[in-house]
Image (spheres, grey):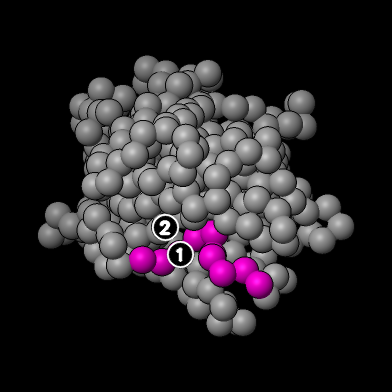
Amino acid sequence: MIINKTFLVITLVATCLQAYTQATLTNLGLEEWTTSDSERYEAPNAPWQSANPAVDFDLTATVDPVEKVTDAYSGDYAAKMESATIFFTFTAGALWTGDFELNLTDPAKSAKFGVPYEGTPTNLQFYYKYFPVNGDSMGVYTILRKWNPNTQQQDTIAYAEVRQTQTVDEYTLFDLPLNYYIENVLPDSIEIAFTASAAGFEYIGQVGSQLFVDEVTLQNEVGITQVWTPEVNIHTFPNPVTDQVHFELDKSISNTILLIFDSTGKQVTTLDISNNYGSLYVTHWTAGTYYFLLKNEKGHDLSSGQFVVK
């Protein structure tokens, strides 16, 4: 699907992400960046990763695959991806959720894809500009996965992909709907990737193609608020649930209430949280996905999440 001959042949790496609390994606606005130890480049903070570390091994490189720019749709910064030549090899500018560990003996294994995530968004939205060279095409994809202990592999819960060749010279909203293959199952990881040259894995692309991206969001069609930068994390267990679901806060906050919604967005109940803990019996609830929103006594949104009733 994406990226280069030597450093970034994107194959969808099956990472075993089996047990963790409710994960929340941060830095989706691409405002947070860190200067490398070598001071040769800046890189966006987690969950984002790029092939920028490769420029430390090619002192002739004049372009970073991903660059922080002030030409943003909103906020102070956005990400610019630019396809270039590194180590005499075409390298598509790309940004993805995951990690990068340069493997000189097997460079294709340098890119690691996927970060912990529990959620069932319906759409991936972002603002972008694109300046292709010689008919190049940008590529975007997202995948939701869940580890299957029976098969010892990751199941694909949902997937979406787009390629586009048109020049877009002003920031434009792109709405990419996800296709679900397995219903009423929460994923445990998400992969989101952007690239300025979509056919990079086939060693095809054009040096100089540029893709700008800002304000990445995951949308839920039922219109329930999702708190992307929570003040408190909530561990929800078991999930999926058949009898009793438990909610455990990672810090003490007084006078909080949990609002529970069904998949249509209708509020079905509330739960007072005391001593950082609460529980609900859902034995007779209709099977499906339910959403929760934690509020304090002033009505401020503190955290959000979801669980599945089987």
Q: Is residue 202 above or below residue 295?
A: above
Which residue is drawn at the image coordinates 73% and 31% (left, top)? Answer: 153
Predominant SS along the magenta part: loop
Seen at 51% across and 67% down, the residue is 43
- The relative height of residue 198 versus residue 283 in the rendered view (above or below) is below
Q: Amino acid at mark 1?
A: Glu
Q: Quadrant of the N terminus?
A: top right
Q: Position of residue 242 (x, y in %)?
A: 50, 25
- At a point 56% along the width and 82% down the height, the residue shown is 39
Residue picked out by circle 2: 80
Label 2 crowd (10 A; few <14 / some 14-19 / many >=20):
many
Q: Is residue 292 visible?
A: no
| Residue under pointer 1 | 67
Q: Amino acid at mark 2?
A: Lys
Q: Which residue is pictured at 40% across the width and 58% down the height?
A: 79
Q: CA distance from mark 1 to mark 2?
A: 5 Å
Res 202 visible: yes
> Is label 1 in contact with label 2 (beta carbons under 8 Å)?
yes
Q: Is residue 35 left or right of residue 269?
A: right
Q: How many numbered dots are placed on residues in this image?
A: 2
Relative side of 87 to 198, left or right: right
Q: Quadrant of residue 107?
A: bottom right
Where does the image place residue 32, in percent across and percent down from the top left? 40, 68
Which numbered dot is residue 204?
Answer: none
Q: The magenta stretch spans which residues?
A: 60-69
Front-most of residues 222 and 272? 222
Tag 2 secondary structure = strand
What percent of the width, then of the height, locates residue 63? Answer: 54, 65
